[in-house]
Amino acid sequence: MDDPDAHPEDFVQQPDGSLRCKRHGLEICKACDVDYTFIYQYLDDDDVEWKPDEPIEEPDGTLRCKRHWLEICGKCCVDYTFMREILEEERQGPMDSDSDDSGRIRKESRDPKRKNSKWSKCVVCKEYAPKQCSNCKTVQYCGAEHQRQHWSEHKAQCRKASQQNANSDSHGTKPELLLLSIGGYHKVVEEMEHEFISSLEPLMELSFTTNEDSALRRLKSKRPPAAVIVVDALYADEHGELVEALIAYTKGKRSKGGLVMFALGFPCFMGAKYWSRGAYACAKAHYLAWREYPTGGIFDEGPQDQGCHLE
């Protein structure tokens, strides 16, 4: 059989580290005359104390672990695929010396404020750094050459930082607040909205949408926002699916459901299920109007068939 190392472009690596032929998706493929089962002798190695060596650099600039010759190696706990992004940007060619970007780089290199910013300096040469390590996003570089040069020093920090980023993403550093305006009346409360948003910015990640399909996707996603403010009125006959999605959102997987607030109007439910969890328990409430924000009694009750109240 052919040595699979002689044709690295013909196989794809699976998440568990195993290899398969690219054409048929098989570990042992008679048509391609390959047998990739040899990789298991490395993946099943019990030498847990072994530490990865310096990566091998391929002619195209990509990196692979020295022991198993893999870009993503579970045994070595390394992922070198981030290098491809850097190389792809560099393959686009050098910037035109007369371009706006090159002028920006020259200007920012002379700017003392930019020079003193730790987020814009190459960790190797201290020059302007338009790129960053895409794996941990904590270190900046002027280009791929200095990233490769710094890798032996950075790899331990990279692994630790990327793990911290993963933990941060899974737990969330700040809850997300979604501002939803489907009726197009968000300008009516623009002044109040601006002050309200300004008071929340240090505490929450803010997002805004005027598209119903986008709102539905956000509400039904695996990681929906922590709270939703509906800027203008919604009605079941016009926005039935969205109203039902908001109701379901308040009864979500969170222990108390999602939080929904209305700036100008509550929807007429017209037979829809009552709000039973979250910020309010309401039925057929016609509208609420702004009163105070961001603390105290945020809403003032208007005409309604049944009272609205905080749970």
Image (tube, rainbow, N blue to C red):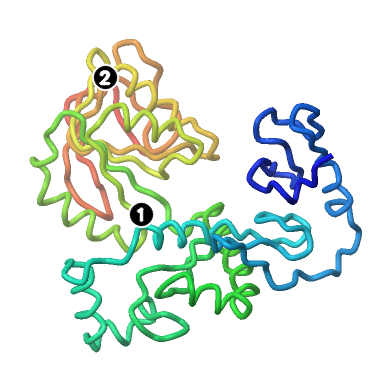
Residue drawn at (73%, 37%), measured in percent from left and top? 20
* In-front residue for pair 116/110: 110
In the image, taking residue 56 as reference, residue 255 lies left or right, namely left
Q: Is residue 170 above or below residue 240?
A: below
The x, y position of residue 187, in whole percent, is: 9, 42
Residues under labels 2 and 1: Cα distance? Answer: 26 Å
Residue drawn at (29%, 22%), measured in percent from left and top? 306
Secondary structure under the numbered disc 2 in the rendered image: helix
Residue to which mark 2 is pinned: 239
Quadrant where the N terminus is found in the figure: top right
Q: Which mark is residue 205?
A: 1
Residue drawn at (48%, 41%), measured in percent from left and top? 223
Identify the amino acid type marked 1: Glu
Residue drawn at (75%, 62%), measured in percent from left and top? 76
* In-front residue for pair 248/111: 111
The x, y position of residue 10, in whole percent, is: 66, 41
Q: Is residue 71 above or below residue 303?
A: below
